[in-house]
Image (cartoon, rainbow, N blue to C red):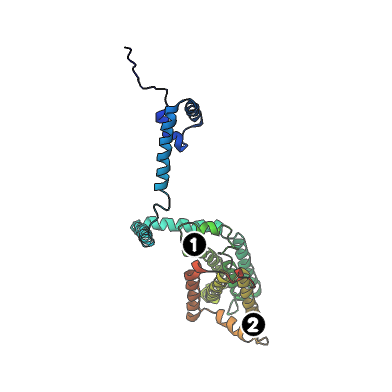
Amino acid sequence: MELVHRAPRPEHPLDLLPEYVSGRLDPDRAAVVRRHLDLCVECKLQLAGWREVAAAARDAYSPAAVALPEALRRRVVEAVAQASESREKRRPLRSRLAWLGRLIAAQVPLARREIWPASTVVMAIGAAVSLIADHGGGAAAGTALALLAPLAAALGMAMIYGQENDPALELALATPTSPRLVLVARLAVVLTWDLILAGAATAALAVVNGPAIFLPLVSLWLGPMLLLSCLTLLLSLFISTSLAIVAAAMIWIVRALEVAGPSRSIDLGGLTSMADAIWQTSPLGLIAALCLLVAAVALVPYREPLTAHPGI
């Protein structure tokens, strides 16, 4: 009697069948397995078994099979958020300040490029006109600078944030960084630039007309700059940049007419009173500027420009 010894047949690619079913086998080896399956019934049966396993695994881990109850899902999301916030609080102060510095520096190329040269040119014009028109300093020294510096800052502030001013805004909103933090960082960059320019122009006038005029001249443009800038920022965020610019220009024109005609022969009623209130540095004006700024920062995640609605 002849005994038949059935040893394992190494040519059967049984160990390759799981990868073949999942599609992770490289094309050359997959072609070899495919040719073998055309000739081998035993391997075809093994293949069918692996396909049943794959189907069962897909059903077990389908979204419907692992869907969490809504209450549990909310708890998981809240736990993850709290853990992330806790990690953020544990970060060293130096690390957080370095990150904030990088965020602020990143806003420089993202802000509209027209802001930097436009502010510089307007401030330079204000300083030049003041140098030419003022004679011997006194109360009139720096009138042109005090008139133009707030306008330059307000126009720049109207263009620092929003879809019409930042083509990459949707991408920025998809990042974990808060829109409020991005707005504050960009505002800090642009406003610091305007303050530096106005301060340098004021220092130049003080060199020519005497150091005594430095602080009085700063008080002429500081309050109006902050209040008008915060007003145009709020209007640009919640209505439109164009309307913010028009509003700033109208207030500036009223103020310019008043400066040109100190006898008040041109009286525009409420507009004149509003321009007078804006164009002074006072505790009430600074508080108003702070309130407008807080409103803009607090509401920016919920903003929906009125121009987005049909018929407006």
Whether residue 63 sits left or right of residue 110 in the image: it is left
Given residues 14 and 262, the one toward you in this image is 14
Figure label count:
2
Q: Amino acid at mark 2?
A: Glu
> Is residue 157 visible to us here?
yes
Residue 218: give x, y in percent of width and height. Answer: 53, 73
Give the alpha-carbon distance from disc 2 to disc 1, as whole Å: 38 Å
Residue at disc 2, secondary structure: helix
Residue 205: give x, y in percent of width and height. Answer: 58, 70
Mark number displayed over residue 275: none
Q: Residue at x 51, y 65 (%)?
A: 187
Q: Which residue is mark 2?
A: 258
Above or below, 72 against 52 in this view is below
Q: Which residue is mark 1?
A: 182
Q: Say which of marks 2 and 1 sits in front.
A: 1
Quarter of the figure with the N terminus = top left
Mark 2 or mark 1: whose residue is earlier in sequence: 1
Q: Residue at x 63, y 87 (%)?
A: 269
